[in-house]
Amino acid sequence: MRAQFGVVVPIRTFALANTRLSDALTDDARAALARQLADTVARAAGDAPVIVVTSAPEVEHWARRHTFDLAPDPGSLDGAAAAGSRHLLRAACRGPWWRTPTSRSPPPSIP
């Protein structure tokens, strides 16, 4: 049975996350916050297929603990959304439905 939807989770790194909070939080606190946010996304995904797009070893380790699929980070948020969506399509999801809060252009076409 094909999944109704999948979840693409692009994460560059936990260690350097949330830099806008650097005046208020230490590096370790920001990394912990990033992990907590990622855990929240993992719980929210439920039984949906999840692909984590990253090249950071600590994020890869986190994704494997959750038994999520992995794809290498292509270097941009739009590229990560496209790579993750292609992966989900190959994994038998019905189609790519995503919106990134920072995206100002339509999603790229998926070959």
Image (spheres, rainbow, N blue to C red):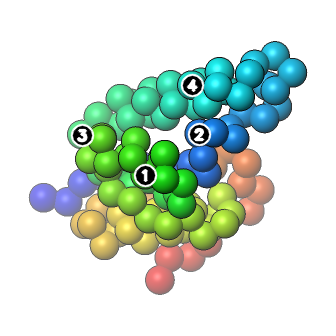
Q: Specify whether 34 is left or right of 30.
A: left
**Who's the residue at 39% across and 59% down the image?**
70
Q: In which quarter of the image is the N terminus?
A: bottom left
Q: Specify whether 107 is left or right of 70.
A: right
- Give whichever of discs 3 and 4 has the lower sequence position: 4
**Who's the residue at 35% across and 29% down the image?**
43
Label 2, on which residue? 14
Label 2 Cα neighbours within 10 Å, binned few <14 / some 14-19 / many ≥20:
many
Measure the alpha-carbon separation of dots 4 and 1: 16 Å
x, y percent for residue 2: 20, 60
In the image, residue 46 above or below residue 67: above
Q: What element carries label 1?
A: helix
In the foreground, 105 or 56 = 56
Q: Nearer the viewer, mark 3 or mark 1?
A: 1
- Say which amino acid is labelled 2: Phe
x, y percent for residue 103: 71, 54
Q: What element carries label 4?
A: helix
- Say which amino acid is labelled 4: Ala
In the image, residue 90 above or below residue 24: below
Q: Nearer the viewer, mark 3 or mark 2?
A: 2
- Say which amino acid is labelled 3: Asp
- Confirm whether residue 9 shows in the render: no
- Give whichever of discs 2 and 4 has the lower sequence position: 2
In the foreground, 47 or 69 = 69
